[in-house]
Image (cartoon, helix red, strand yellow):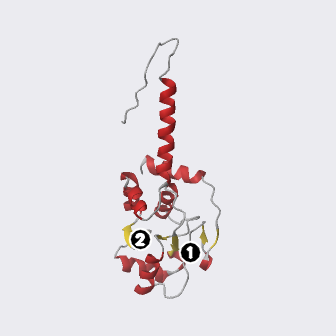
Amino acid sequence: MSGSLGRAAAAAATALLRWGRGVGGGLRGPGVRAAGSGGSGSSEHLDALVKKDKVVVFLKGTPEQPQCGFSNAVVQILRLHGVRDYAAYNVLDDPQLRQGIKDYSNWPTIPQVYLNGEFVGGCDILLQMHQNGDLVEELKKLGIRSALLDEAKDQDSKLSEMAQFESMHDPFCGNFTLSIQDA
């Protein structure tokens, strides 16, 4: 796994989130809606679920307690981007939902991520989108501003302040200018 995901996990671990009981007994975070029961495997029901919210995730476990590493990675990536308002469906609670969503998407694995009703993929694709910046752009299309943009802006501002401070006169070195360049 990349350093970005490790940093994502560390950043998300430091965030304090309060979780409560969701519909159907699953744990959920603020803004996260859990799956209900009944007709969960039908194509019509699944179509309604994936289109009901801007961001929908079918995972093993809950956002608070993912039951597999891939589901955990998806939750951490969403947290890193500040996405808190999404529907999360625990496929372990409903075997019909688990098989039904695989058939619906024609994708054999869980987790599965949907943005604006469209299937994006699983953990590997979401991680790739995170790493190459596509996820920031896709979230923007949904009207969701990635928290990474604010974090990057704050870091740029701090670097700029440091550069201004360090470009002043130093009694031992004389005048100097700090040049910040992208690697």
Q: How many marks?
A: 2
Give the residue at x 37% y 33%: 181
Determine whether the residue tagged by mark 1 lies in a helix, strand or loop: loop
Q: Position of residue 128 (x, y in %)?
A: 37, 56
Q: In this view, does 15 lie above or below 122?
A: above
Q: Is residue 64 left or right of residue 52?
A: right
- Which is nearer the eye, 13 or 81? 81
Q: State the separation of the CA atoms marked 2 and 1.
A: 17 Å
Q: Is residue 136 left or right of residue 90?
A: left
Label 1 environment density (alpha carbons within 10 Å; few <14, some 14–19, many ≥20): many
Q: Position of residue 23 (x, y in %)?
A: 60, 78
- Which is nearer the eye, 3 or 129? 129
Q: Quadrant of the C terminus?
A: top left
Q: Name the residue under label 2.
A: 116
Give the residue at x 42% y 49%: 2
Q: Position of residue 49 (x, y in %)?
A: 47, 79
- Which is nearer the eye, 125 or 67? 125
Q: Position of residue 5 (x, y in %)?
A: 46, 51
Q: Which amino acid does label 2 sit on?
A: Asn
Q: Name the residue under label 1.
A: 34
Q: In this view, does 14 lie to the left or right of 107?
A: right
Q: Which amino acid does label 1 sit on?
A: Ala
Give the residue at x 41% y 55%: 130
